[in-house]
Amino acid sequence: MENSGKVVSNRREELDALRGIAAVVVLLHHVHWMWPPPWVLPDSLLLHTPLRMIATGRAPVLFFFVLSGYVLTLAVQRRKSFRMMDWYWRRTLRLCLPIAAGLLLSLLLYQICRHHPISHQLNPFFWRAQWGQDPTWEDWFEETTLLGDVTGQGYPLDAAVWSLTHEWRISLLLPLAVIWRRVWIPTILVSAIVSMVLIFSGEVAPDVTLGRGVLNGLAATLYFILFFAAGYALAVSGARLPKGRGIRIAAWLAVFAGCSIGRDSVVLVGACALILLVSDPASRSSRLLRGGIWQELGKISYSLYITHLPVFLAVVAWFGLFMPPLEVAGLSVVSAILVATVFFWLVEMPAHRLSQFHRKTIPRPALGGDMSSS
């Protein structure tokens, strides 16, 4: 992202840090799924406190959607000239080139590890859904083109890609909403109505991830538009958290509820509250997130999200039968962070530069009005 004006320059680092923290929570969720802890926590603690994020992994992914709607809207608004096809190509390069490379990494790791049995002590999700059958180049192409829900096969090379399917589809629609930014309230209302209709009609499940088939897959994407729309509304409206200690306490309570209650609507409110809390450059939480390890995690967060599951499986295949589960879990986390760091420099950054090069080679006539942020 480019820095342009005081609104964005003070937000980027904090939001990058939040993205990194959310990616780590997803990583810990998969660690929890693969190797349940040796102790048993009561459901009242595991499912009704922020530990729920690790137990279910859904809240951080929904937060990604809200945050994407927010930062992508700011990116579009900053540009004084805009060309739709330019935006589409850049989003595709930024998202899909790393996905293609991450799925290729999974395919190659499978070939290396295929003769090493994966311990059945793992959660069945990992030894049935992930690498459950010999992947082929056709599988790689199908998943790279984000058609796992259309074909009904899912993403056995990397289950985490399910959310990126919706991210890519919705981010291509986002410029249309930003162009007509005066209608952000109707956009939110329509998105909410569509989401409720999809749930109550039974077209999508309350805990939907991927659909099955073309229509059901698109219905799932329509459901998640609400979360992008919430981030879009925060950015377009220029929302700020009112001053006052009581307001901040209420906002943090909303964040706590979003982390602890298993309802998407509550997660949505908590995600918006968290973005508003850290967007204030004078706040303690904003200052805390501006440097150190948080920024490093934010930098590699996308690479970490894409690559951690194949790395986990490779570590388990090589070491899972003769190392204690806790040690395998620790080795998996360290390996995932190291691989993500290398992946960031070798794949994600070149994809970013390529998207910027494409942008510079295409003349961009102005579109309608001034899209830059104030």
Image (cartoon, grey):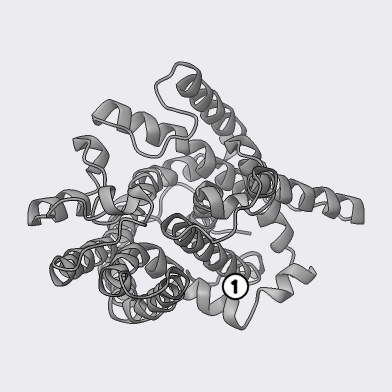
The image shows residue 319 at horizontal and vertical percentages of: 31, 75
79 and 70: which is toward the camera: 70
**Vertical relation: 308 (above or below) 294:** above
Q: Within 10 angstroms of label 1, few (less than 14), some, or many (20 or more) residues?
A: many
Left or right of residue 284: residue 52:
left
**Vertical relation: 153 (above or below) 205:** below
Q: Residue at x 66, y 47 (%)?
A: 42
Left or right of residue 193: residue 336:
left
277 and 74: which is toward the camera: 277
Q: Residue at x 52, y 36 (%)?
A: 226
**Vertical relation: 209 (above or below) 29:** above
The image shows residue 101 at horizontal and vertical percentages of: 23, 67
**Vertical relation: 341 (above or below) 113:** below
Q: Residue at x 41, y 77 (%)?
A: 331
Q: Quadrant of residue 90?
A: bottom left
Name which residue type carries label 1: Glu
Figure quadrant of the C terminus = bottom right
Left or right of residue 185: residue 120:
left
Q: Which residue is tagged 1?
A: 13
- Secondary element under disc 1, as helix, strand or loop, is helix
Task: Determine if residue 60 is in view.
Answer: yes
